[in-house]
Image (cartoon, rainbow, N blue to C red):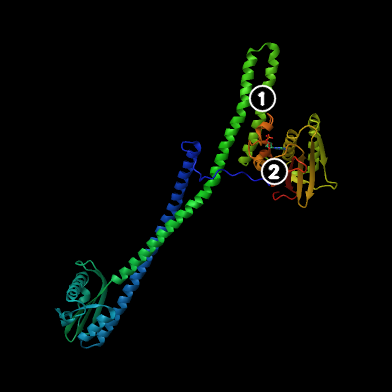
Amino acid sequence: MYKKTSFARLRDLPPANSDKRKDFLLYKKVHLRLTLLCTGITVVIMVIMSFCYLYVSEKGLYRNQFQAFRNDINTISTNLEQQSVISMEWLSKMEAQGNYLFFVLDNGTPFLFNQLNNSGSQAQRNFLFQESQEAYAALHDVSSSVLHGTSGTLTHTEYEFTSPSMDTNYFAAKIVTGKNDSILEITVLTSMRNLEAQINAQRVRFLLIDLAAVAALTVFSWMFTGRLLKPIIETQKKQALFIASASHELRTPLAVILSAAECCKQAPAEKKGNFINIICQEGMRVSSLVDDMLILSQSDNHQFPIRKGATELDTLLMNAYEAFGSLTQEKSISLSIQLPDEALPPCSADPERISQVISILLHNAISYTPTYGKITLALSRIKEKFLITVTDNGIGIPDAEKEKIFDRFYRAEKSRSGKDHFGLGLSIAYEIVKAHGGSISVQDAQGGGSCFTVILQTVPPYT
Ligand code: ADP
């Protein structure tokens, strides 16, 4: 079965300053840019989403913590209301329970508890005492109205407080209550360190996840864009090769035409005819080459005109058999045809194009079969498939060449081919058969020579 030959692997670095090296470097540059673009866009989206998530999550954490603090202050306030006397034991217990710091003012005078409480070092106590005073002062500035408690009433307010001296954040609450003709002002403080540690840990976790995702995305994008670019690069290489081969093939007949025209100018009248014949012949060659190239270019651009209709393949084969009869006779080659006995259903195909394929195969068979050789044109049907075979007992095709002969401008051995062989016939046949949803392949014929098989569907996948 025919398979397209693959190009040299892009990983193999071509020699410096060569065109291939430049192409390779260009490919790498484009590959890198595409990778960066893909990764960049995805990373930006991922980072924005991470930030959004972190923002919402941190706000939620803060809200929950503040709500928990409020609930605790509510409980403390309720406890306070139920007690007629505030004892130091009670204050100590409350502090220890909620990891709080209390600062109590009794009618504006610091409560003895503030000095007596001895948990932690003295320096720590002094510091916390100072913080409590600052928190007290802060709220005094902000909403002094809530501080005017009177006997029998209790007010409390919660707020966030940042110590200006230590730059530490706290949840703070001010409870004001009137008891036994004295006004108690209690400042409750709890550090937001735990919350901040939790938020920081979450940020670090997200940073690590994002970094891992960036690494994975870069690798994925590199592989993905590499796969994406490969067919484009290969097509570009094929086109470059096609143009180079076409120019090469055109150069010879054009050179002959120019030199014949030059000779014709100086030749005597009776010899001019020879040169004009040469010019006509070479002109025809150029014209046929240009026609072939046009067909292939149309096929590449998906503009290959295929006009399908109900086609009787046996009639096409008979026509070809008759058309090539004289050519085979000239070379003393025997041409035979084998058609199935039963009537075949029509095939949905473009009769002109299929005739073109049969002509290419017959033309090749005649070209590569020596005098007194034998060529057989046959049609058969196996299940849902039509098989057209062209078998000759000519020079045959070595196994190593069997795949390559369908490539454009490929000739198995240039010396074996005549002047009219550009190496485009089989690539045109391949494109036509492909456009019909069929396949074309070559095998060795029994007893030597080649056997080309074209398979067409009786009920094609297209309509
Ligand atoms: P060309 O115009 O050179 O025949 P093709 O594309 O038709 O171009 O064929 C490509 C090459 O395949 C030929 O150059 C020839 O070497 C080989 N080839 C094709 N048909 C035959 C055949 N029937 N027998 C031997 N070699 C063949």
**Could you say which is closer to the camera, residue 290 or residue 379?**
379
User: How many residues crowd around disc 2 within 10 Å: few (fewer than 14), some, or many (20 or more)?
Assistant: many
**Image location of residue 29, percent across then percent down:** 45, 44
Q: Is residue 441 left or right of residue 208?
A: right
Separation (CA) of disc 2 from disc 1: 29 Å
| Mark 1 within 8 Å of ligand 1, using the beta carbon | no
Front-most of residues 355 and 346: 355
Give the number of callouts: 2
- Locate residue 237: give its quadrant: top right
**Amino acid at circle 2:** Val
Residue 86, visible in the rendered structure: no
> In the image, is 423 to the left or to the right of 200?
right
What residue type is disc 1 on? Glu
Could one spot residue 372 in this view of the protein?
yes
The residue wearing badge 2 is 433
**Which residue is disc 1 drawn over?**
282
Identified at 27% across, 78% down, the residue is 99
